[in-house]
Image (cartoon, rainbow, N blue to C red):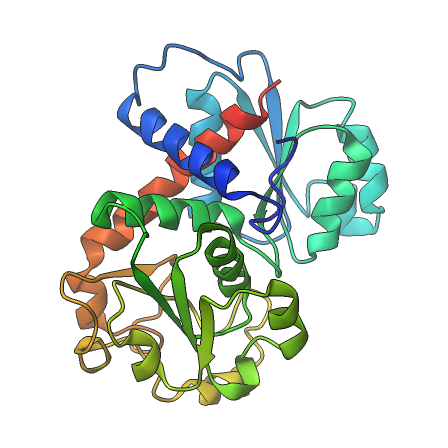
Amino acid sequence: MQHLLSIEELSAADITALLDSAALLKAERGGHAAQPLAGQTWALIFTKSSTRTRVSFEVGIRELGGFPMFLSKNDIQLGRGEPIKDTARVLGRMVHGAIIRTFAQQDVADFAGYSGIPTINALTDDEHPCQILADLLTVREKLGGWEGKKIAFVGDGFSNMTRSWMWAAKRLGFELAIASPPACQPPADFLTTLDAPNVSVTADPRVAVDGAHVINTDVWLSMGQEDQKDKELEFAGFEVNAGLLSSAAPGHIVLHCLPAYRGKEISEEILELHADTIFQEAENRLHAQKAVLVALAR
């Protein structure tokens, strides 16, 4: 593995190996025998703000012996119109790896191609691979794995989270049911390309949640969509609350990648009831991302 650009580009073996490594790194935290990033500097290039992503990557790089360098859009020439390929060719000669959180997936792909250094997608509008790895690690810790499990996603059916979940289902074979308003569902051409009969899409959240072992949700308006307030009106009836979860499988868990807007995509009651799992999921960003860094270390 040279880069982590998307779940789509990973195989089932890749995902399993990363999760095995993450579990080991979590168990060994504070006592790592190796420092694979010793003497290395990794750039964190963020044009989208973050709490969990920035902190988890900075901590993870330091724990693996490296030095993180945070660069916002105001710190580098990208914010003033320099082409991504020029920034990539400069940084590729100076740092050992790059972690990019931005809007366009193509920018991350172009950076990887022009820089010649390991590149990690820390979130784009198309995919959120690091979060899905953390979520899968949480499912394995809480439920023993995803084999024979039904995972439901309630919310925007074609967000970066749902795209990554769909590719994870394609690779790993678990049942994924997405509940989304018709205007926010994956387009037919994407589903044709995905070609995953274990992925279903419905406009009825009760159908998706019925018998589900994992219920996942996210904000209705992704970063950069805050001015699309009319879109929120599409999601009436899509709040993850006690009534919706009444038909979920016994012992189900609820996931949310955070930040959460209580009273919108999830109720206060349900978030607090499942807070231990949700914040374990947040912690697992650190361990999953450390596994990615170890896999990419040169």
Side of 156 where 125 appears, left or right: right
In front here: 202 or 275? 202
Q: Residue at x 24, y 80 (%)?
A: 244
Q: Position of residue 7 (x, y in %)?
A: 55, 49
In front here: 47 or 121? 121
Camera sees residue 283: yes
Q: Residue at x 30, y 83 (%)?
A: 206
Q: Position of residue 274 (x, y in %)?
A: 19, 60
In front here: 270 or 167? 167
Work out whether 133 lies above or below 184: above
Camera sees residue 58: no
Give the quadrant of the N terminus.
Answer: top right
Give the quadrant of the C terminus.
Answer: top right
Asked where in the image residue 72 lies, by quadrant, the reply is top right
Work out whether 37 lies above or below 161: above
Q: Residue at x 26, y 77 (%)?
A: 210
Work out whether 174 lies above or below 180: above
- Label count reads 0
Side of 251 where 50 appears, left or right: right
Q: Residue at x 35, y 25 (%)?
A: 25
Side of 21 where 195 appears, left or right: right
Q: Position of residue 127 (x, y in %)?
A: 58, 56
